Image: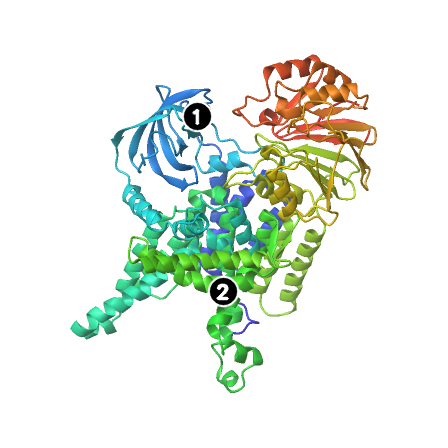
Amino acid sequence: MNGDSPDTSIEHPALLASFSFAAGIAFGRFYDCDPAILGAVALGFAAALWRADIGLRVIMALALAGGAAVISGHGFKEIRSNHVSRMDIEGDVAATVEVKFTDSVRPHNTRYIVEVKSIGGAQASGAARLVMRRGTGYSSFEPSPGDILLLENVKFRQPRGFRNIGAFDYEAYMKERDIHGDFFTGKKTNITLTGTTFNWMRPVEAVKERMRRNLDMGKREATAITWAILLGDDGMITPEQRSDFSRAGTAHILSVSGLHVGFVAMACFFAAKLMFFAMAYPVRYHWASAGIPMRGAAFVALMMAVFYAALTGMKFPIIRSAIMIGVYLAAVMAGRGRDFYGSFGVALFIILLMWPWALFDAGFQLSFTAVFAIVIFMERWWKPMFFLTPLEEIAPTWRQTIVRKAPWLFSYIAVSVFATIGTAPIVAYHFNNAPVYGFLVNAIVVPISSFAIPWGMLWAMGGHGLATDLTGWMMGLIGTLSAWAAGLPMSYKAVTAFHPAALAFYYLSIGALLLMKRGAARWIAAGGAAVVALVIFLVPPRSAGDGGELVARFVDIGQGDCTMVLWPQKGAMVIDGGPKFETFDPGRSLVAPLLFREGRSGITAMIATHEDSDHLGGLAGLASLAAPEMFMDNGAQSEAMEKLRGSIKAPGGHRRLYAGDTLEFPGGLKARVLNPPNGEAPYKEAVNNASLAIMLEYGEVRVLTLGDIGKEAEQWLVSSGADIRADVIKIAHHGSASSSLPEFLKAVGARTAIISAGYRNNHHHPSAKALERIKAAGMRVFRTDMDGEVRVITDGKKVRILTWGMERYKEGGE
């Protein structure tokens, strides 16, 4: 095969039909797609259509129309009147549910997907998630698929994520997966098994639970990695581990994908082939020579691939791999040759037919793109290194000579490089991350995984302790290598937002190289598309501050505080970073992506108002992804604050702030510190009262942020004579009753008040008394628990307010 001649095998009818179906889905959601992307898709479709014969053109046109029809009808499913998506119930309720399967095991709870039968005595329908907390009276009860449970004294909530403008839409994510609510158990909850129905997942879950117990390595980190890689359950993975794998470029190993299914199927195939050959050869020689062992091995490998796919959760990459492996092994059993492009097209079509919205899912895009890129590039540019012509055998090139010295090593590197070429733009777009050493690290980690995964599965049902210890050692090695690579200088490059059209033209360029015939037109088309992609990538989309405005984003971060201030000249300040949980760090997973989408890869100033965990919990994770130029706090000497100071390496160092300090930044922002005072406080010393109170000034507009100060600090601010007048006030302590005194609100005189609080939080913030006082002061109230993110946008003279989901700007004070 010559690298300069096109590989016409990719013009497989099934492949082109599935691509046309995908294009139809993109056009069917035209309202949610950028015109440039649709234009690039149309150009690619037209090019493929032009090269096809008349019969294939008809198939492609029908597939295009079918894709548009499928996605158009997907959003208009009829919802029953008793569907759980229509219910929003306060307080404890009783419900009857049927367990479908286990979703994940986490440090303090286990999550199950259930089918709802009734709520509050009334018949109900739809799927929901049951979150069973451990450490309660029923903690020893482990539901299995098919169990019908009576839940008493549970809370039911609609799926609700963090509602921030331009951020990940958790509610849409859950809706597309047909999960419409959450049941939360508590100390008063009682769960009764009332019956059992047939569910094919029941024996599979029983096997998985036994494996989970056998694969408990004794240490949280090692167990978490082992469960994630072998069983597809990443509920125990910490935010730090997830970040290490992402930076190292090995995140695909941490999540069960087609690679894992392939390793298991391959190991089973060769082991079964050897066993069948050993059994058949002494008895019936002609059976062995007729390929019977190979066909039997293909059947065993197929069954194991299907079982492993069911065991690990039937996610998109796994379904894709199972279908492709199934088609391939079926061809082996039938004595026919392999057909990658046909099986790839079939897998793509089946998944998009069942879940058309998957086309817009990052995991789906990465899975299919990685496999396709590996096969395409290996066939065109890698195989010629080994399958030489007679002339090349006499005088091979220096590249062919080197590669053939260590084929296994260079093959792993090549696979990693080709996968990176195919997926790097998608990773950069969705995760704002570009691993620098990823292809080299994968050349080591992937071979280890190819042995560790089948070996771990072999002994997961129980066996000699040394075998399990070896599994743990290999899993630990994968984690150690990923952490080591993540810690290297320049291990990854943070990528700020870029226009998605760059993706479309990037893949158009690759498509031109693969599809077009040798000649000048081929290079002109590929080069032209590449240049367009590069130009679009280098010209960032419009972000906050580009129009000379300051934007203060009061981020919906649950029960906590986080304010992101953006101003011209790419200025960025973050005041507090919200809470942090064992398996979720909002600083890494929520605030950093918001910052990157605004075109900022770093932070001008990071400020911690005080030491409460719901304010400083996410700052360390945020700083690890978006380094601050300077870090400031209130000087608290607590263990949590000292630990945070030690983890943040800011070029400008650490600075303690107190009343009287003024910070001025290029671009027009000035910040005056109003609290705490320097020296002994004139009020009752407390953690909350020592919070930093900061007045942000931009032109003639003032925005006052208060941390968690209480009434004592508010009284001192009024009596101190400080200028605390503001246009917008971020209410102290999430709107608790102990803050927002009438005389303080009057002295501030703001027309707009913003409250940061978690939806239906356990503290019942904001309090009714505080809301009454705020409204009595004549202020409009915006709340993150009700309105989602609240943005204050000002040109220095006028103020506009924008909330999550708001259809238009609302004029604020002048």
Which amino acid type is shown beneath numbered disc 1?
Answer: Phe
Residue 116 position in % (x across, y down): 36, 28
Whole-percent x and y of residue 254? 47, 52
CA distance for labels 1 and 2: 46 Å
Is residue 109 or residue 267 the one in the foreground?
Answer: 109
Residue at numbered disc 2: 444
Q: Which mark is residue 156?
A: 1
In the displayed structure image, the side of residue 683 where residue 737 appears, left or right: left
Does residue 244 appear left or right of residue 190 in this picture?
right
**Amino acid bearing label 2:** Ile
Q: Residue at x 68, y 16 (%)?
A: 774
Type of colouring? rainbow
Q: Is residue 390 above or below residue 179?
A: below
Asked whether the viewer can see residue 61, the reply is: no
- Under circle 2, the secondary element is helix
Residue 706: name its quadrant: top right
